[in-house]
Amino acid sequence: MTDSDLSAPSQEEIAHRFNIPERKVKVQTLMKTLNDEEQKYCICQSTDCTSFMIACDKCEEWYHGVCIGVTQLDAKSIKHYYCDACRGKDPSLSIKYKTKKPWKDKFKSDSSDVDRTARDPRLRESGKAKKSSRRCGDCTACHKKEDCGRCDYCKDMKKFGGPNKMRQKCRLRQCANFYKKKKYKQESSDTVEIEDDTPTQCYGPGCIECARPGSKYCSDDCGLKLSKSRIYEMLPSRIQQWQSSPCAAEENNKRALESIRRKQLEAKTRLGDLDQRHKELDSLLERAKHLKIDPDQGGTETEDDLELSLYCVTCGSEINQRGALRHMEKCFAKFESQTSFGSIYKTRIEGNSMFCDFWNPQQKFYCKRLKVLCPEHTKEPKIGQDEVCGCSLVTNVFDETGELCRAPKRKCVKHFCWEKLRRAEIDMERLRWWMALDDLFEKERTIRMSMSNRMGVLGLMLHQSVDHDPMTPMTTPQIRDSN
DNA sequence: GCCAACGTTGGC
DNA sequence: GCCAACGTTGGC
């Protein structure tokens, strides 16, 4: 830190450094901040002051814009800000907004347009009322400049990807006073709409204060007090009710969990079997290593066989039967190399992964081809001159004779790449079962979530089943279904 | 009476 | 010309 860093910053510097409007900078408070790193602010009581903050003009406490729902744009139109705590203590306090300049206001439509139309005989007679505005211009909502992006009206907007069918202002920007209950009073020639400004009493337990505009409570504390007393009052009986009567949804969930558990066990067993098949293949290859080449095997094709031709399944060109497997294998590898399958996540499964998982630093992903079939990152093993083919011989296509093909591996056209394809077949099956297992884990998670929600405080407080005919008790599954 | 949907219009 | 959002209306 240099000397200049230690010197007292100017008001402008502080405003710039803390990203706050200059007029809100309380130099004394901030100087304290710079010297005392443990200073805590806002309702969140954190020491962080790197984001936009606004100070209460009554208690001079600083609040993060995000914590109290005031954006930097909103703050530009605020003249005096009073925090919730101060407004709770003194209901006469309300956030004061800057008024627009008269020359600008002259051409703007605001709440006065409605009144002006009602008052101004020229406008009334012409019937050409200006498009009115549903704004009082005083409440917090009227001064919000940004849409929340979460309410139904925001979600309808084009900018949030909605169909633009409702075409209404963001719920948080809807004027709190415009929708107040209206009273009508008869005046000499006209019926005039007036706002019902009768203050309502705060709903807080034992509180006799006036509720804040647009709220049932005089302060956040009163709202919390009522919520607390509701929980103390209602929760014990709800828990008792929950424990005394069986719940159909809970029973269904338990049955579903049992079924999922059975399926998971089956999947794990099948995966174990497939691992065993890999081991059997390894031992078969080991057995083949000790065999000697039989020069009579591998050249048993008749002349008819040699004349037979077929078409490659990949490129479609005509090939003779003898070299068909070799051609198709190479052709597949060529075309497969042209397409990449990748994911940014490395495979994490128990045992040997069936995926290639080669990290591609250019494309920044892990290769997700089957490892055994990946033509790009898996090298074909070199075949020695003495190696035998080793493929199990069969009769009637599927019946294994127990003998192995002893043709030279390099020349055997009948069983070209047989162990690679066998391994790929097993890995594909393993992949299917892993995916099934993943699906089952997700289902289990969802069910467990709904079970814990149902038994949670919110679930118990919000949902209740009433038996309208207690004289004829229902059978268990019909009693209660709180789903 | 409520509300989704939509035509319309003032402001930019 | 575009867009936010107001006022109206038909269906429920």
Image: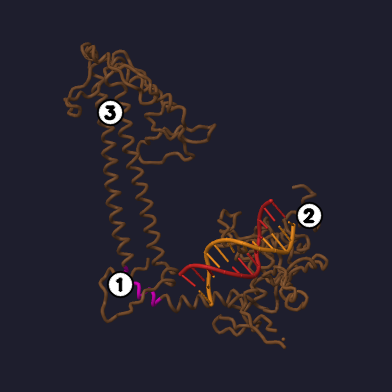
Chain colours: A brown, B orange, C red
Q: Amino acid at mark 1?
A: Ile
Chain bearing mark 1: A
Chain bearing mark 3: A
Residue visible at 25% across and 72% down in the picture: A475
Q: Name the image quarter holding residue A325.
A: top left
Is residue A351 visible in this depiction of the protein? yes
Is residue A44 visible in this depiction of the protein? no
Distance, label 2 to label 3, CA atoms, is 73 Å
Which residue has dot 1 on it? A479
Q: Are marks 1 and 3 on the same chain?
A: yes
What is the x, y in percent for residue A261?
29, 53
Q: Amino acid at mark 2?
A: Glu
Label 2–label 3 contact, CB within 8 A: no
Which residue has dot 3 on it? A282
Residue visible at 69% across and 69% down in the picture: A133
Which residue has dot 2 on it? A13
Residue visible at 35% across and 75% down in the picture: A241
Distance, label 2 to label 1, CA atoms, is 68 Å
> Does the magenta segment cover residue A70?
no
Quadrant occupied by the C terminus of chain A: bottom left
Magenta region, main secondary structure: helix
What kind of element bears circle 1? helix
Distance, label 1 to label 3, CA atoms, is 58 Å
> Does the magenta segment cover residue A242?
yes
Which span of residues is magenta-colored?
A236-247
